[in-house]
Amino acid sequence: MAILRLSHVEIRVPDLELATAYYSEVVGMFETAREGDRVFLKCWDEHQHHSVILQSAPTYGLVRMGWKLQFLEDLDYYQAKLQEAGVFVNRLTPEQVGPGGGYSIRFNLPSGHEMELTHGMDQVGNLLPLTNPPPKPLGMVGIAPPRIDHIFLTCEDVGENTEFLERVLDFHMTEQVLGDDGFQIAAWLEHSNQSHDIALVTGQDRGLHHFAYYVEDWTAIRDAADILAYHGVSIETNPTRHGATRGHCLYFFDPAGNRNETFTGGYYVDHDEPPVTWTEAEMGRAIFYYDGMVNQKFLTVHS
C-alpha cells in the first residue's frame, strides 16, 4: 500500500489562453485535452495523461493536488484511514474525474487544502519510443522539464498538518525548521525516497507557495533562467541553492501569479531515517544557503 509520488496539480488562472501559451511555449509542456474551462498538460517524459490542469477562474491559486497510488486497493486503505481520522472522503469514478480518468478519492487537509489520491489515470506515453529510444526528443521548446517534482504549501499550523500527513497518509518527514519556542515553522516530507515531495511553511491556510519541475542538472537551471529572461518572465530568485533538501533551484511566476520552480539535486532518503532540523537562527540558510538570510517576500507571497 503506497502513495508513489505527486501526480498532478490543478491551479486557477484568470486568462486561460495566456496561461496555456505560457505553460506550453515557455515551460514547454504539451497539451493533452480540453474540457469546458480546463486545459490539461503533461511534461515530455511523463507517461500519464497530465500533470498540470489549468482552470479558468477570477483569481489564481491552487484548486487541488493529486497523488499517484501504486494499487487500486490503496484507495480503500486510505479511505478507511481518513474516515477513521474523522475526515470526509469523496470517492469518484473515472467518468466523474474527467479527461485522463482514474479512480480517486478527494478530501481536505487540516489546512483546508484539497488533496486527491488517484489510481489508473490514462497512460499516453512519453515522447520516446519504447524500443531503442534516444535520451530525449529533439525540437522541444521552452524549458522542457521531464516531469513535475514537488509542491510547497502554506498553512497556519505546520505541526498539525505534518502530523496528519505522517499519521494518516504515511508520509515521512525529512527536514524541518523549528522556532526558538519549539514551534514548527516549516517541514519537508516524502513518499518517494527523494528529499521531499511536499513541503509546508507557516502562512495562510489553503495557500500555494509553489510547485516545482524537475530538471536534469545545474546547467538546466541556468538554461531555464536564460529562457525565462528571453520571454520577459518575472524571475524571483537567480539560480541558487537550498540548504534544506540540498537542491539547486530557480523561482519565477506564471502570468497569473502562481509561483513555479525548476529544481534539481537533493538526495535520496530511507523512510526510517531521522529528520534534519534547522534552527530559527539558521532558517535563512535552510531556504537559500548562499545568501543565508530570510527573504520575507519569498516566504509571504503565495497564491
Image (cartoon, rainbow, N blue to C red):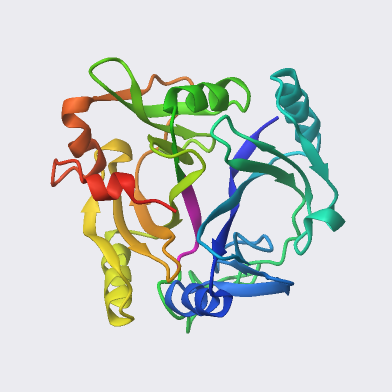
Quadrant where the image shows the C terminus: bottom left
**Does residue 205 sit above or below 217 in this rendering?**
above
Asked if the magenta segment contains residue 59, the reply would be no
Q: Nearer the viewer, residue 78 or 60?
A: 60
Left or right placement of residue 232 versus residue 43 in this view: left
Q: Can residue 236 be seen here?
A: yes
x and y percent of residue 285 in the render?
18, 38
**Does residue 295 sit above or below 20 in this rendering?**
above
x and y percent of residue 236 in the render?
27, 61
Using the rendered view, name the quadrant where residue 174 is placed. top left
* Residue at horizontal 76 percent and vertical 27 percent from the top: 77
Most frequent secondary structure within the magenta stretch: strand
x and y percent of residue 217 in the render?
32, 59
Using the rendered view, name the quadrant where residue 123 is placed. bottom right
x and y percent of residue 40 in the render?
65, 68
* Residue at horizontal 67 percent and vertical 60 percent from the top: 48
Highlighted range, magenta: 145-151
Quadrant where the image shows the N terminus: top right
Q: Residue furthest front?
A: 58
Q: Residue furthest bottom?
A: 139
Left or right placement of residue 94 versus residue 240 in this view: right
